[in-house]
Image (cartoon, helix red, strand yellow):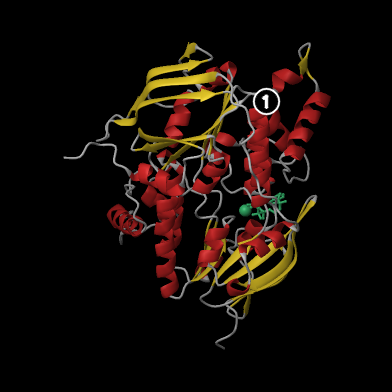
Amino acid sequence: MADTPIISIKHVTKRYPGVVALDDVSVDIRQGELHSICGENGAGKSTLMKILSGVITEYDGQIEVRGESVNFRGTRDAEACGLSIIHQELNLVEELSAAANVFLGREHTSSLGLLNNRKMNAETSELLKQLECDVHPQAIAGSLRVGDQQLLEIAKALSLNSEILIMDEPTSALTESEVERLYRVIDHLREKGVTILYISHKMDEVFRLSDRITVLRDGKLVKTLEKEETTPREITHLMVGREIEEIDLGDSRQVGDVVLEVNNLSLPWPGHARAWRLKEISFELRRGEILGIAGLMGAGRTELLECLFGASEETPAGKVLLENQLVRFRNPNEAKRAGVAMVTEDRKRLGIFAQMCVRENISMCTLEETVTSGVISRKKEAEIVDDSVARLSVKTAGPESSITSLSGGNQQKTIIGRWLLTKPKVLLLDDPTRGVDVGAKAELYRLMDQLCREGIAIILTSSELPELLTVSDRILVLAEGRMTAEFDRSEASEAAIMEAATESALPHG
Ligand SMILES: Nc1ncnc2c1ncn2[C@@H]1O[C@H](COP(=O)(O)OP(=O)(O)OP(=O)(O)O)[C@@H](O)[C@H]1O
Ligand SMILES: [Mg+2]
């Protein structure tokens, strides 16, 4: 039948100890549509997608694909049925090459059973080319930046030629230009008739791509709507169940004296044609100030923050003064001790400690504060942790829950909470709101503003320009490792920033 839904989700319930992740959810997905799933952090979006793709096999209720009841025992079963998923928390094997990751578990072999590397490399190259990504098929996955890793996950899903593709926040680590690329790929897939289930916290994206939108709240289905018949405002309202206040920050904030001075900071890039990751960057940062760093993928935003945090592989040249003292951090510990904290963009690799619980993940950097005469005060620790969880509204069954049991956005909030507790002089935030829902974003902006009022200075990068424009007092623009512009809050605009960000740093002619 033409109008049999390609997927029918019927009364699906998924319980975890202390949490009902999905509560009697029923949704039909139409053949060939792009169906977005929206909801706050912890609403149950990823859980539903993991059930559909065979990652989660224990649940109540029924899934039908093309009218037939299915019971996937693993992702292979789902793939055989034409369903594949691009995970939110990237699932690459870090030690393996790009090509090996794409073909993991279904490697091309010769008639003698030997790996056909040439074929796998060629196909990987082709897929990455479609994504306009210039990563080499033999590059080790773990050495790639998050944005490239995300493209690699996408390449992997494309290689399966699935009829139904699930994308769980595919753009969260991509920059504007990469997002445009992904849209082109999505358009192409849709022309081929691929059905897409799409999760995103970005309303502009949801409204640009979707045919229909389903909203989940606290594991329950709120509503499925035709895109044409709704608005971003309505969706947001359905997601959070209340109005989100407009935020207007910074205007009345007092900016103090210089806390950080960066002079001619350069970072070499051995073996690369450009020879530097950062070139002669100079700026000042004042107490109470939020300095935004804009730039395209590869412009050097993360590198700059890493450099200031003592986390770069190469030794930087130039001078950094913290409170008028020359500093040269050899590692993040030294930076931390001096009062510099950093929230990284790559929470899986550098941020969360997967084997620890929520409490430990939050308090690990502040344990000294909870120590009285050599003994950790569990009571003090519990207070600090509870306060942090409440301030950022981290959704968790409790502080002893494993961090990996939290939804993606809630893991991110936990890490931010950890670093805020260290009461740094300078806080470096590398794309902190990646994957964080609208309500929590507003919370986070408010918290940043509050910290600045307490005299902390913040350097922030973001993959979303409107966000930078909302919260920054000043914005520096990087292009190819150089600083190409500096804007005051009042003069900054998306157009002006984009122009400076695409300016080639190399002299022409
Ligand atoms: N393995 C697990 N063990 C225990 N609880 C879990 C587990 N996985 C998910 N949960 C809980 O189920 C709920 C839904 O999580 P899910 O990951 O589906 O949220 P989400 O909508 O994808 O959120 P986000 O936008 O933050 O990614 C959360 O409260 C989460 O803590
Ligand atoms: Mg999720």
Give the left or right position of residue 85, taking residue 440 as reference.
left
- Residue at (41% x, 38% y) in the render: 143
* Quarter of the rendering occupied by the C terminus: top left
Q: Amino acid at mark 1?
A: Glu
Give the left or right position of residue 148, taking residue 125 as reference.
right
Question: Please, what secondary structure does the residue beneath circle 1 have?
Answer: loop
* Quarter of the rendering occupied by the N terminus: bottom right
Give the quarter of the image for residue 432. Answer: top right
Residue highlighted by disc 1: 454
Give the quarter of the image for residue 38. Answer: bottom right
- Residue at (51% x, 39% y) in the render: 490
Q: Position of residue 268 (x, y in %)?
A: 32, 27
Can residue 477 be seen here? The reply is yes
How would you rate the neighbour count of disc 1 (Cα within 10 Å): few for under 14, some for 14-19, many for 20 or more?
few
Q: Nearer the viewer, residue 410 or 51?
A: 410
Can residue 167 be seen here? The reply is no
Q: Position of residue 224 (x, y in %)?
A: 67, 71
Q: Nearer the viewer, residue 38 or 44?
A: 38
- Residue at (70% x, 41% y) in the render: 402
From what the image shows, is residue 485 above or below residue 324? below
Q: Position of residue 354 (x, y in %)?
A: 62, 38
Q: Nearer the viewer, residue 480 or 395?
A: 480
Q: Nearer the viewer, residue 76 or 409?
A: 409
List the single residue furthest toward the left: 509
